[in-house]
Image: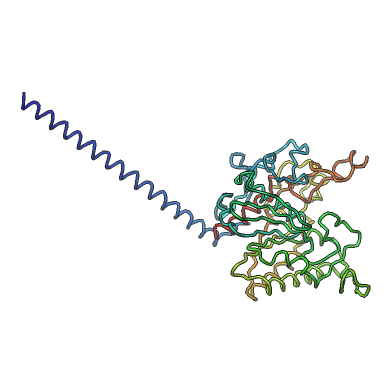
Amino acid sequence: MAKKHQIVLGIWGIRSSFRSLIALLVTILIITAVYLSQDSGRFFENRTNVELSQCNLFSGKWVFDNQSYPLYKEKECTYMSDQLACEKFGRKDLSYQNWRWQPHQCNLPRFNATALLETLRNKRLIFVGDSLNRGQWVSMVCLVDSAVPPTLKSMHTNGSLSTFKATEYNASIEFYWAPLLVESNSDDPLNHRVPNRTVRVKAIEKHARHWTDADILVFDSYLWWRRPTMKVLWGSFESPDGIYKEVEMLRVYEMALRTWSDWLEFHVNPNKTQLFFVSMSPTHESGEDWGDGENCYSETEPVLKEEFWGSDTDPKTMRVVENVLDDLKTRGVDVQMLNITQLSEYRKEGHPSIYRKQWEPLTEEQISDPSTYADCIHWCLPGVPDVWNEFLYAYIVHQ
Protein backbone atom coordinates (compact mmCIF):
# COMPACT_ATOMS: atom_id res chain seq x y z
CA MET A 1 0.00 0.00 0.00
CA ALA A 2 2.84 2.33 0.91
CA LYS A 3 4.59 1.42 -2.33
CA LYS A 4 1.42 2.19 -4.29
CA HIS A 5 1.13 5.52 -2.48
CA GLN A 6 4.74 6.34 -3.42
CA ILE A 7 4.01 5.51 -7.09
CA VAL A 8 0.95 7.78 -7.06
CA LEU A 9 2.98 10.58 -5.47
CA GLY A 10 5.70 10.04 -8.05
CA ILE A 11 3.24 10.22 -10.91
CA TRP A 12 1.64 13.32 -9.36
CA GLY A 13 5.09 14.90 -9.00
CA ILE A 14 5.90 14.16 -12.63
CA ARG A 15 2.57 15.65 -13.70
CA SER A 16 3.17 18.74 -11.56
CA SER A 17 6.63 19.18 -13.01
CA PHE A 18 5.24 18.68 -16.51
CA ARG A 19 2.55 21.30 -15.87
CA SER A 20 5.16 23.70 -14.49
CA LEU A 21 7.30 23.10 -17.55
CA ILE A 22 4.33 23.76 -19.84
CA ALA A 23 3.49 26.96 -17.93
CA LEU A 24 7.11 28.08 -18.20
CA LEU A 25 7.15 27.37 -21.95
CA VAL A 26 3.88 29.26 -22.45
CA THR A 27 5.27 32.24 -20.53
CA ILE A 28 8.42 32.21 -22.65
CA LEU A 29 6.35 32.02 -25.83
CA ILE A 30 4.17 34.96 -24.75
CA ILE A 31 7.20 37.10 -23.88
CA THR A 32 8.85 36.15 -27.17
CA ALA A 33 5.69 36.97 -29.14
CA VAL A 34 5.39 40.38 -27.48
CA TYR A 35 9.04 41.14 -28.15
CA LEU A 36 8.80 40.02 -31.76
CA SER A 37 5.63 42.03 -32.34
CA GLN A 38 7.29 45.14 -30.96
CA ASP A 39 10.41 44.44 -32.96
CA SER A 40 8.38 43.82 -36.13
CA GLY A 41 6.56 47.08 -35.46
CA ARG A 42 9.89 48.85 -35.36
CA PHE A 43 10.92 46.98 -38.49
CA PHE A 44 7.73 48.01 -40.27
CA GLU A 45 8.20 51.60 -39.17
CA ASN A 46 11.77 51.58 -40.47
CA ARG A 47 10.60 49.95 -43.65
CA THR A 48 7.95 52.64 -44.07
CA ASN A 49 10.58 55.35 -43.65
CA VAL A 50 12.81 53.69 -46.21
CA GLU A 51 9.90 53.33 -48.60
CA LEU A 52 8.85 56.96 -48.24
CA SER A 53 12.35 58.22 -48.89
CA GLN A 54 12.66 56.08 -52.02
CA CYS A 55 9.07 56.19 -53.28
CA ASN A 56 7.17 58.64 -55.45
CA LEU A 57 3.98 58.91 -53.39
CA PHE A 58 2.25 60.85 -56.15
CA SER A 59 2.59 58.15 -58.84
CA GLY A 60 -0.13 55.56 -58.42
CA LYS A 61 -3.79 54.77 -58.95
CA TRP A 62 -7.14 55.18 -57.24
CA VAL A 63 -8.53 51.99 -55.65
CA PHE A 64 -12.16 51.69 -54.58
CA ASP A 65 -12.13 50.81 -50.88
CA ASN A 66 -15.41 51.13 -49.00
CA GLN A 67 -14.01 49.17 -46.04
CA SER A 68 -11.31 51.66 -45.02
CA TYR A 69 -12.70 54.90 -46.46
CA PRO A 70 -13.92 57.50 -45.68
CA LEU A 71 -11.59 58.28 -42.80
CA TYR A 72 -14.38 60.23 -41.05
CA LYS A 73 -18.10 60.91 -41.50
CA GLU A 74 -19.25 64.23 -42.91
CA LYS A 75 -22.03 64.57 -40.35
CA GLU A 76 -19.67 63.84 -37.46
CA CYS A 77 -17.12 66.56 -38.26
CA THR A 78 -17.80 69.44 -35.88
CA TYR A 79 -16.30 72.06 -38.18
CA MET A 80 -17.43 70.89 -41.63
CA SER A 81 -17.86 73.69 -44.18
CA ASP A 82 -21.20 74.11 -45.99
CA GLN A 83 -19.21 74.77 -49.17
CA LEU A 84 -17.87 71.21 -49.04
CA ALA A 85 -20.65 69.25 -47.29
CA CYS A 86 -22.07 67.56 -50.39
CA GLU A 87 -24.08 64.90 -48.57
CA LYS A 88 -25.76 67.52 -46.38
CA PHE A 89 -26.86 69.44 -49.48
CA GLY A 90 -28.47 66.49 -51.23
CA ARG A 91 -25.85 64.37 -52.93
CA LYS A 92 -27.06 60.74 -52.89
CA ASP A 93 -24.17 59.00 -54.63
CA LEU A 94 -21.48 58.88 -51.95
CA SER A 95 -18.95 56.62 -53.66
CA TYR A 96 -16.63 59.63 -54.06
CA GLN A 97 -15.83 59.11 -50.37
CA ASN A 98 -14.53 55.55 -50.86
CA TRP A 99 -11.49 55.94 -53.10
CA ARG A 100 -8.03 55.25 -51.70
CA TRP A 101 -4.81 56.42 -53.34
CA GLN A 102 -2.35 53.58 -53.88
CA PRO A 103 1.21 54.58 -54.86
CA HIS A 104 2.86 52.19 -57.33
CA GLN A 105 6.04 51.62 -55.30
CA CYS A 106 4.97 51.68 -51.66
CA ASN A 107 2.07 52.01 -49.25
CA LEU A 108 0.83 55.34 -48.00
CA PRO A 109 0.84 55.28 -44.15
CA ARG A 110 -2.70 55.23 -42.81
CA PHE A 111 -3.67 58.50 -41.14
CA ASN A 112 -3.46 58.34 -37.35
CA ALA A 113 -4.97 61.43 -35.70
CA THR A 114 -3.35 60.79 -32.30
CA ALA A 115 0.09 60.36 -33.85
CA LEU A 116 -0.30 63.62 -35.76
CA LEU A 117 -1.50 65.53 -32.70
CA GLU A 118 1.40 64.17 -30.68
CA THR A 119 3.79 65.35 -33.40
CA LEU A 120 2.07 68.75 -33.32
CA ARG A 121 2.30 69.07 -29.53
CA ASN A 122 3.22 72.71 -28.71
CA LYS A 123 3.34 73.52 -32.44
CA ARG A 124 1.52 75.51 -35.13
CA LEU A 125 0.55 74.01 -38.48
CA ILE A 126 -0.65 76.77 -40.82
CA PHE A 127 -2.26 76.47 -44.24
CA VAL A 128 -1.78 79.67 -46.27
CA GLY A 129 -3.56 80.40 -49.53
CA ASP A 130 -6.95 80.37 -51.22
CA SER A 131 -10.24 78.48 -50.81
CA LEU A 132 -8.68 75.23 -52.04
CA ASN A 133 -6.12 75.41 -49.28
CA ARG A 134 -8.93 76.28 -46.88
CA GLY A 135 -10.65 73.08 -48.01
CA GLN A 136 -7.49 71.12 -47.22
CA TRP A 137 -7.40 72.80 -43.81
CA VAL A 138 -11.04 71.82 -43.14
CA SER A 139 -10.13 68.27 -44.18
CA MET A 140 -7.23 68.18 -41.72
CA VAL A 141 -9.42 69.51 -38.90
CA CYS A 142 -12.04 66.84 -39.68
CA LEU A 143 -9.36 64.14 -39.72
CA VAL A 144 -8.31 64.93 -36.14
CA ASP A 145 -11.68 66.13 -34.80
CA SER A 146 -12.91 62.79 -33.42
CA ALA A 147 -9.63 62.25 -31.52
CA VAL A 148 -10.18 65.38 -29.41
CA PRO A 149 -12.95 65.55 -26.75
CA PRO A 150 -15.44 68.42 -27.19
CA THR A 151 -14.22 70.23 -24.08
CA LEU A 152 -10.60 70.13 -25.25
CA LYS A 153 -10.94 71.79 -28.65
CA SER A 154 -11.96 75.18 -30.00
CA MET A 155 -12.27 77.18 -33.20
CA HIS A 156 -11.60 80.90 -33.43
CA THR A 157 -11.50 83.31 -36.37
CA ASN A 158 -9.79 86.68 -36.29
CA GLY A 159 -9.81 88.44 -39.64
CA SER A 160 -7.90 86.33 -42.17
CA LEU A 161 -6.74 83.79 -39.59
CA SER A 162 -8.86 80.83 -38.45
CA THR A 163 -7.48 78.60 -35.70
CA PHE A 164 -8.46 75.11 -34.55
CA LYS A 165 -6.91 74.39 -31.17
CA ALA A 166 -6.43 71.01 -29.47
CA THR A 167 -5.77 72.25 -25.94
CA GLU A 168 -4.57 68.95 -24.46
CA TYR A 169 -1.69 68.99 -26.94
CA ASN A 170 -1.34 72.79 -27.14
CA ALA A 171 -1.46 72.17 -30.89
CA SER A 172 -3.06 74.46 -33.45
CA ILE A 173 -4.10 73.80 -37.05
CA GLU A 174 -4.69 77.14 -38.74
CA PHE A 175 -5.72 78.69 -42.04
CA TYR A 176 -4.67 82.12 -43.28
CA TRP A 177 -6.47 83.69 -46.25
CA ALA A 178 -3.93 85.01 -48.79
CA PRO A 179 -5.13 83.83 -52.22
CA LEU A 180 -2.23 85.44 -54.10
CA LEU A 181 0.29 85.09 -51.23
CA VAL A 182 1.40 88.70 -51.72
CA GLU A 183 -0.87 91.65 -50.93
CA SER A 184 -3.84 92.28 -53.22
CA ASN A 185 -7.27 93.87 -53.30
CA SER A 186 -8.72 90.35 -52.76
CA ASP A 187 -7.31 89.95 -49.26
CA ASP A 188 -10.58 90.38 -47.37
CA PRO A 189 -11.57 86.85 -46.27
CA LEU A 190 -15.27 87.57 -46.89
CA ASN A 191 -15.49 90.33 -49.53
CA HIS A 192 -12.82 89.42 -52.05
CA ARG A 193 -14.64 89.16 -55.37
CA VAL A 194 -13.55 92.36 -57.10
CA PRO A 195 -13.82 93.15 -60.84
CA ASN A 196 -10.26 94.47 -61.28
CA ARG A 197 -7.89 92.19 -59.41
CA THR A 198 -4.71 94.01 -58.41
CA VAL A 199 -1.56 92.70 -56.73
CA ARG A 200 1.36 94.36 -54.96
CA VAL A 201 4.01 91.87 -56.08
CA LYS A 202 6.70 93.27 -53.78
CA ALA A 203 4.57 93.38 -50.60
CA ILE A 204 4.01 90.34 -48.37
CA GLU A 205 4.78 91.44 -44.80
CA LYS A 206 1.13 92.28 -43.96
CA HIS A 207 0.34 88.59 -44.37
CA ALA A 208 3.63 86.98 -43.47
CA ARG A 209 3.88 88.45 -39.97
CA HIS A 210 1.11 85.99 -39.01
CA TRP A 211 3.22 82.99 -40.06
CA THR A 212 6.64 83.89 -38.66
CA ASP A 213 6.69 81.48 -35.71
CA ALA A 214 4.90 78.58 -37.45
CA ASP A 215 6.42 75.10 -37.20
CA ILE A 216 4.83 73.76 -40.38
CA LEU A 217 3.67 75.93 -43.31
CA VAL A 218 1.57 74.64 -46.20
CA PHE A 219 1.15 77.09 -49.10
CA ASP A 220 -0.87 77.13 -52.29
CA SER A 221 -1.65 79.80 -54.89
CA TYR A 222 -2.97 79.16 -58.36
CA LEU A 223 -6.75 79.48 -58.64
CA TRP A 224 -6.80 83.28 -58.40
CA TRP A 225 -4.17 83.66 -61.12
CA ARG A 226 -6.27 82.13 -63.90
CA ARG A 227 -6.42 85.08 -66.31
CA PRO A 228 -4.23 86.31 -69.20
CA THR A 229 -2.99 89.47 -67.46
CA MET A 230 -2.94 90.92 -63.96
CA LYS A 231 -2.88 94.51 -62.79
CA VAL A 232 0.26 95.19 -60.78
CA LEU A 233 0.63 98.03 -58.28
CA TRP A 234 3.97 99.55 -57.32
CA GLY A 235 3.18 101.59 -54.24
CA SER A 236 0.36 101.26 -51.72
CA PHE A 237 -3.39 101.05 -52.24
CA GLU A 238 -3.79 104.17 -50.09
CA SER A 239 -1.26 106.30 -51.99
CA PRO A 240 -2.36 108.43 -54.96
CA ASP A 241 1.17 108.11 -56.36
CA GLY A 242 0.97 104.37 -56.96
CA ILE A 243 1.94 103.06 -60.40
CA TYR A 244 -0.42 100.55 -62.03
CA LYS A 245 0.45 98.35 -64.99
CA GLU A 246 -1.17 95.38 -66.78
CA VAL A 247 1.38 92.55 -66.91
CA GLU A 248 1.24 89.08 -68.45
CA MET A 249 0.04 86.65 -65.80
CA LEU A 250 2.97 84.21 -65.72
CA ARG A 251 5.39 87.08 -65.26
CA VAL A 252 3.37 88.50 -62.36
CA TYR A 253 3.02 85.03 -60.84
CA GLU A 254 6.78 84.57 -60.89
CA MET A 255 7.38 88.01 -59.35
CA ALA A 256 4.94 87.20 -56.54
CA LEU A 257 6.56 83.84 -55.86
CA ARG A 258 10.01 85.47 -55.84
CA THR A 259 8.81 87.90 -53.17
CA TRP A 260 7.41 84.95 -51.21
CA SER A 261 10.64 82.95 -51.59
CA ASP A 262 12.77 85.90 -50.46
CA TRP A 263 10.65 86.20 -47.34
CA LEU A 264 11.13 82.49 -46.59
CA GLU A 265 14.89 82.76 -47.02
CA PHE A 266 15.28 85.62 -44.56
CA HIS A 267 12.51 84.95 -42.04
CA VAL A 268 12.14 81.17 -41.71
CA ASN A 269 14.50 78.93 -39.77
CA PRO A 270 14.81 75.78 -41.95
CA ASN A 271 15.96 73.79 -38.90
CA LYS A 272 12.66 74.55 -37.14
CA THR A 273 10.02 74.97 -39.82
CA GLN A 274 8.85 72.39 -42.35
CA LEU A 275 7.71 73.96 -45.62
CA PHE A 276 5.28 72.60 -48.20
CA PHE A 277 3.77 73.92 -51.43
CA VAL A 278 0.65 72.26 -52.86
CA SER A 279 0.68 72.05 -56.65
CA MET A 280 -2.33 73.27 -58.62
CA SER A 281 -5.65 71.62 -57.93
CA PRO A 282 -7.28 70.72 -61.27
CA THR A 283 -10.77 71.84 -62.25
CA HIS A 284 -13.20 69.79 -64.32
CA GLU A 285 -15.15 72.45 -66.14
CA SER A 286 -14.97 70.94 -69.63
CA GLY A 287 -16.59 67.56 -70.26
CA GLU A 288 -14.85 67.38 -73.62
CA ASP A 289 -11.67 66.51 -71.76
CA TRP A 290 -13.02 63.07 -70.84
CA GLY A 291 -15.54 62.73 -73.65
CA ASP A 292 -19.03 63.50 -72.32
CA GLY A 293 -21.12 66.01 -70.39
CA GLU A 294 -20.81 69.74 -69.90
CA ASN A 295 -18.59 69.58 -66.83
CA CYS A 296 -18.42 67.72 -63.50
CA TYR A 297 -22.20 67.92 -63.06
CA SER A 298 -23.76 64.44 -62.67
CA GLU A 299 -20.37 62.69 -62.81
CA THR A 300 -20.17 59.66 -60.50
CA GLU A 301 -16.93 57.87 -61.52
CA PRO A 302 -13.27 58.92 -61.74
CA VAL A 303 -11.42 59.06 -65.05
CA LEU A 304 -9.73 55.67 -65.43
CA LYS A 305 -7.40 56.60 -68.29
CA GLU A 306 -3.84 56.69 -66.97
CA GLU A 307 -2.05 60.05 -67.16
CA PHE A 308 -5.30 61.86 -68.02
CA TRP A 309 -4.64 65.61 -68.15
CA GLY A 310 -7.41 68.22 -68.34
CA SER A 311 -7.31 71.30 -70.55
CA ASP A 312 -7.72 73.65 -67.57
CA THR A 313 -4.39 72.62 -66.03
CA ASP A 314 -1.44 74.73 -67.20
CA PRO A 315 2.01 73.06 -67.09
CA LYS A 316 3.72 76.43 -67.64
CA THR A 317 2.37 77.69 -64.31
CA MET A 318 3.56 74.55 -62.57
CA ARG A 319 7.05 75.01 -64.01
CA VAL A 320 7.22 78.52 -62.55
CA VAL A 321 6.63 77.04 -59.08
CA GLU A 322 9.18 74.27 -59.66
CA ASN A 323 11.84 76.78 -60.77
CA VAL A 324 11.26 78.99 -57.73
CA LEU A 325 11.45 75.99 -55.37
CA ASP A 326 14.62 74.73 -57.06
CA ASP A 327 16.20 78.15 -56.63
CA LEU A 328 15.17 78.23 -52.96
CA LYS A 329 16.89 74.90 -52.43
CA THR A 330 20.19 76.34 -53.67
CA ARG A 331 19.78 79.01 -50.98
CA GLY A 332 19.38 76.42 -48.22
CA VAL A 333 15.57 76.47 -47.99
CA ASP A 334 13.88 73.16 -48.78
CA VAL A 335 10.19 73.36 -49.70
CA GLN A 336 8.54 69.98 -50.28
CA MET A 337 6.15 70.02 -53.22
CA LEU A 338 2.90 68.12 -52.62
CA ASN A 339 2.36 67.19 -56.25
CA ILE A 340 -1.38 66.51 -56.11
CA THR A 341 -2.21 67.64 -59.66
CA GLN A 342 -2.06 64.41 -61.66
CA LEU A 343 -3.79 62.23 -59.06
CA SER A 344 -6.56 64.82 -58.61
CA GLU A 345 -7.04 65.07 -62.39
CA TYR A 346 -8.69 61.64 -62.35
CA ARG A 347 -11.34 62.69 -59.83
CA LYS A 348 -13.89 64.50 -61.98
CA GLU A 349 -16.69 63.18 -59.73
CA GLY A 350 -15.19 64.53 -56.51
CA HIS A 351 -16.40 68.15 -56.77
CA PRO A 352 -19.45 69.63 -55.01
CA SER A 353 -21.18 70.30 -58.33
CA ILE A 354 -24.62 71.60 -57.26
CA TYR A 355 -24.47 69.98 -53.81
CA ARG A 356 -23.28 72.85 -51.63
CA LYS A 357 -24.65 75.97 -49.98
CA GLN A 358 -25.52 78.59 -52.58
CA TRP A 359 -24.49 82.02 -51.37
CA GLU A 360 -26.74 83.84 -53.85
CA PRO A 361 -30.26 82.99 -55.13
CA LEU A 362 -30.28 80.88 -58.30
CA THR A 363 -31.61 82.35 -61.52
CA GLU A 364 -34.31 80.67 -63.60
CA GLU A 365 -31.68 79.81 -66.20
CA GLN A 366 -29.51 78.11 -63.57
CA ILE A 367 -32.43 76.16 -62.17
CA SER A 368 -33.35 74.92 -65.66
CA ASP A 369 -29.73 73.89 -66.39
CA PRO A 370 -27.89 72.89 -63.19
CA SER A 371 -24.58 72.43 -65.00
CA THR A 372 -24.38 76.24 -65.34
CA TYR A 373 -23.82 76.67 -61.61
CA ALA A 374 -21.98 73.43 -60.81
CA ASP A 375 -18.87 73.96 -58.66
CA CYS A 376 -16.18 71.96 -60.46
CA ILE A 377 -13.31 73.66 -58.61
CA HIS A 378 -13.59 72.79 -54.92
CA TRP A 379 -13.84 69.26 -53.48
CA CYS A 380 -16.44 67.41 -51.45
CA LEU A 381 -15.45 66.22 -47.99
CA PRO A 382 -14.72 63.51 -47.10
CA GLY A 383 -12.86 63.19 -50.39
CA VAL A 384 -9.82 64.10 -52.42
CA PRO A 385 -8.22 66.65 -50.00
CA ASP A 386 -8.09 63.92 -47.33
CA VAL A 387 -5.54 62.14 -49.53
CA TRP A 388 -3.54 65.36 -49.87
CA ASN A 389 -3.41 65.39 -46.08
CA GLU A 390 -2.35 61.75 -45.98
CA PHE A 391 0.71 62.86 -47.95
CA LEU A 392 1.26 65.70 -45.49
CA TYR A 393 0.87 63.27 -42.59
CA ALA A 394 3.44 60.92 -44.13
CA TYR A 395 5.99 63.72 -44.41
CA ILE A 396 5.30 65.21 -40.96
CA VAL A 397 5.05 62.00 -38.93
CA HIS A 398 6.94 59.32 -40.85
CA GLN A 399 9.98 61.20 -42.16
Placement of 63 over or under 58, stated as above or below: above
Most foreground residue, 168 or 381? 168
Query: Residue at left 31%, top 43%?
Result: 27
Residue 398 in sight here: yes
Most foreground residue, 64 or 232? 232
Asked which quadrant contains residue 149, the reply is: top right
Residue 327 in sight here: no
Question: What residue occupies the far front of the structure in this picture?
Answer: 151
The answer to whether residue 321 is left or right of residue 51 is right
Most foreground residue, 15 or 272? 272
Asked which quadrant contains residue 195, the reply is: bottom right
Placement of 290 over or under 319, stated as above or below: above
* Position in image of residue 5 (x %, y %): 9, 27
* Position in image of residue 290 (x %, y %): 76, 49
Q: Quadrant of the C terminus?
A: bottom right
Most foreground residue, 316 or 126? 126
Query: Residue at left 76%, top 61%?
Result: 221
The answer to whether residue 37 is left or right of residue 196 is left
* Position in image of residue 16 (x %, y %): 20, 34
Q: Quadrant of the N terminus?
A: top left
The answer to whether residue 272 is left or right of residue 368 is left
* Position in image of residue 8 (x %, y %): 13, 28
- How many numbered marks does the figure carry? 0
